[in-house]
Image (cartoon, coloured by chain):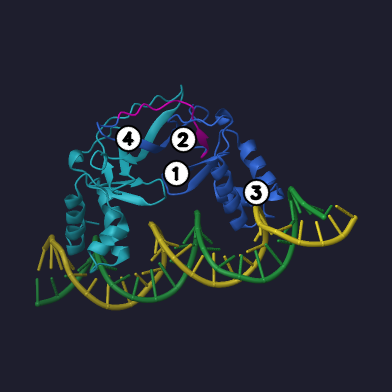
Chain colours: A cyan, B blue, C green, D yellow
Amino acid sequence: MKKRQTKSKKAILECLQKAGNYGLRADIIESQLPNFDRVTIYRVLQSFIDDGIIHKVISDNGKFYYFKCLKCEEVHYHHHYHFKCSICGKVECMEDEMEVKTPLGYSIENVNFWITGVCSNCKK
Amino acid sequence: MKKRQTKSKKAILECLQKAGNYGLRADIIESQLPNFDRVTIYRVLQSFIDDGIIHKVISDNGKFYYFKCLKCEEVHYHHHYHFKCSICGKVECMEDEMEVKTPLGYSIENVNFWITGVCSNCKK
DNA sequence: CTCTTATTGTAACGATGTTGCAATATTAAT
DNA sequence: ATTAATATTGCAACATCGTTACAATAAGAG
């Protein structure tokens, strides 16, 4: 069960690292790495998630984005959100902490916070 | 282009109203109303959204939930979240306001806030 | 170099949601 | 009540995203 170092893992991780705080969808990674099969990409991404190397977020239109966020080098448990700019289309992992006040008796295991709007680059 | 009153609309709206603050997936509505075609259900739900009668939220596993939230009789623009209990599986529309502080230059158009955890009913 | 087995590619599947089109049903007009 | 216009429906077929099964390949330990 010991993990192995492979070309696909190296290439996919590189893609995500180059994207920085911006997330990538599986199909974007696929188009950037035409040598690797779709299935391989999905499996490698899942193994990264299992290892806690990357994180995955569901977008408001039902597609997953994967992040090797630069700001998240150390594993972080805080409640941050992801921002999709409706103009440039980029999806950014934001470091702002979200304050969540659940009613009495509710406990939180996991969050998925998504915001769509206009980023500062596209705002004129 | 004038909308018509139909049996499917009546039945689907009733389903959602009975669910109260809890959301339903299309496939759940489908199983509750076996007389209507899948496609009809999707189209009716979309027309309700267009009319602003219901709202739709993406879950963290990529499926949409539809709400005719009792607390949202009047259209509301505040940033609320939805809570899925990992024990009972219910998805609840919460009225708590989420405080969002976006960086300078970012503007918000839309939000999708999802929290998974344990609800007060299931907490012992 | 050899062996074990983690990883890959192919193919095929599954779940969710959408589109085209002819048939049906609702509503307004007569 | 009849009729006409057209919104709505059901069927079939498609599209996308992600998963599973299984045989072939390749990483890395000895």
Disc 1 and disc 2 in contact, CB within 8 angstroms:
yes
Image quarter of residue A3: bottom left
Q: Which residue is labeled 2 in the image?
A: B82
Lower sequence index among marks 3 and 2: 3
Looking at the rendering, the stretch of residues picked out in magenta corresponds to: B89-101
- Looking at the rendered image, the quarter that the N terminus of chain A falls into is bottom left
Please give the name of the residue rendered at 38% of the width and 38% of the height, measured from the top-left corner: B109
Compared with A78, B35 (above or below) is below
Q: Is residue B94 magenta?
A: yes
Do pointers 4 and 2 mark residues of a single chain?
yes
Label 2, residues with CA under 10 Å away: few <14, some 14-19, many ≥20: many
Q: Which residue is labeled 1 in the image?
A: B59
Disc 4 and disc 2 in contact, CB within 8 angstroms:
no
Q: Is residue B52 magenta?
A: no
Q: Which residue is labeled 3 in the image?
A: B2
Please give the name of the residue rendered at 53% of the width and 38% of the height, measured from the top-left corner: B90
Residue type (three-letter) at the residue carrying disc 4: Ser
> Along the line of sight, which residue is nearer the eye, A28 or A79?
A28
Q: Which residue is labeled 4 in the image?
A: B107
Compared with C2, A42 (above or below) is above
Lower sequence index among marks 4 and 3: 3
